[in-house]
Image (spheres, rainbow, N blue to C red):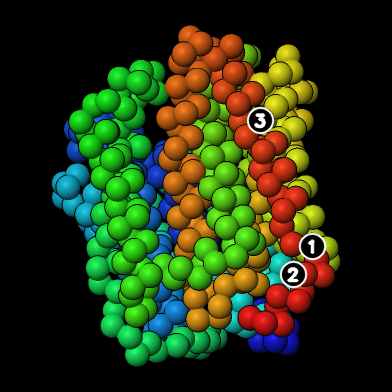
Amino acid sequence: MNRAKSNPVLFVLFLGVLMAALDIAIIGPALPAIRDGFGATDRQVVWVFTIYLLFNLIGTPLMAKLSDRLGRRDVYIADILLFAVGSVIVALAPTLTWVIVGRAVQGFGSGGIFPVASAVIGDTFPPEKRGRALGIIGSVFGVAFLVGPILAGVVLKFFSWHMLFWGPLPFALLLVPLAWRWLPTTGKPSNGKPDLLGMVLLALMLTSLTYALNQLDAADLARSVRSPQVMGFLVLGIALLPALAWVERQADDPIIHPSLFGSRQLLLANALAFGAGVIEGSMVFIPALVVAAFGVSESKASFMLLPIVGTLSIGTPLFGHLLDKVGSKIVVLIGTALAAIGTAMLGFVSLNYATFYIAAILIGFGLSALLGAPLRYIMLGEAPPSERASAQALISVMTKVGQMLTGAVVGAVAASLGGGVLGYSASFRVLGGWAALLFLLAFLLKPREAERQTWETT
């Protein structure tokens, strides 16, 4: 694809992903205002975030499969419109219940935006230019988390929280005609029956796991795991996995095609996505470590995360460009090594401001070399073209499940040692070991030449 055509495609994809990413970045500052506005409790208002996560998880594989079958452009536009409709429902919500309904619609729509955008890159860019394009799209999240909280703070100071949720409407009005004009209609109609049973089982499994993991109490992990609301849903979610695998092997057009686990490279990409999600999820505990180590306020501790966010926005396009030069194995090795060193520093090194910021920068660059482009790059090269969006969705789901698991594990390790510097340092020592394991796993990835040969067969 020449530059005259690729630039508008990238702009449309960038803008759509930015719209969804900004919503994730603003919801944290908005939650207290929503809670106070409806006189709700903290436990009630947390569903504003949880329901979004759940429907995002469910919508990711479903929307991706639809784009593989009905075409990228139409499903991308549908995702944008669903997100905008959900935002309007939240903005106009008369009760907290309607806020939760709107967030569910938002989450379902946003679930397909990033996987479909990544699949469009696979459809329209030659393999030697995919890394750069994926890096540009992936950098959106760093930009959003730099701009989002500041934007939310300004809006909340001068307007009500409702105004935050009117923001996606102008995005949608701009994006729909642009997407219709520039995005490809790539899709392969299936002659097989829709995999309705697979869709139901997948939704039930993700719902059960999401609910169970969100009910875990990190301060008393053993007791909470034994509780019915955790153990029952956890067992159900795990039990549904082999049932889903069996159904998918029998289906004419499975929602998650078994071929997406059909090679070592694909299995490694999925495992690394889960592992990277675990590391990314641990970032929410860094402010607690900073408060304990430096005695600063929670607001200043959150501000001290800016080096991680900044390096994400800088590193993602840089490593995307490097992908096109040296391939995914080298980039993933760099990313896992940096993440391992950074997390280990937080666990083993006596923290001062210098060592903390060095560790934060290393973690940020490490995550940008994992989550931004490389694993999606691998999937684009390995997955059949007819399953590209589904493959991208699988990476998203594995990452999000890893993120959810982290909260329980890191919190439990910290709580078992009494919290504070001792507890959170122990947690990051565990994460350093986890990242080192991912580093070793990355050695099993294909070298550059073998990766190039795969492109010729997909």
- Residue drawn at (30%, 58%), measured in percent from left and top? 243
Is residue 75 placed above or below 225 in the rendered structure? Answer: below
| Kind of residue sitting beneath label 3 | Gly
State which tag comes first along the sequence, 1 or 3: 3
Element assignment for label 2: helix
**Residue matched to label 3:** 433
**Left or right, 429 with reference to 54:** right
Element on which disc 1 rests: loop
Tell me whether circle 1 and circle 3 mark residues in contact (CB < 8 Å): no
Of label 2 and label 3, which has the lower sequence position?
A: 3
| Disc ID at residue 451 | 2
Closer to us: 185 or 165:
185
Q: Which class describes the residues within 10 Å of circle 2: few (<14), some (14-19), or many (20+)?
A: some
> Looking at numbered disc 1 in the image, what kind of residue is underneath it?
Pro
Marks 2 & 1, CB-CB < 8 Å contact: yes
Q: Are marks 2 and 3 in contact (CB under 8 Å)?
A: no
| Residue 147 visible in the current orientation | no
Q: Is residue 351 left or right of residue 415?
A: right
Disc 1: which residue: 447
Q: Residue at x 27, y 30 (%)?
A: 42
Quadrant of the image containing the N terminus: bottom right
Q: Which residue lies furthest to the top in this view?
A: 418
Total label count?
3
Q: In this view, does 147 lie above or below 233?
A: below
Badge 1: residue crowd in 10 Å (few <14, some 14–19, many ≥20): some
Indicate the position of residue 337 as horizontal and vertical percent values: 75, 40
Q: Does residue 29 appear to the left or right of 129 in the view shown?
A: left
Label annotation for residue 267: none
Residue occupying image coordinates x 35% and y 55%: 242
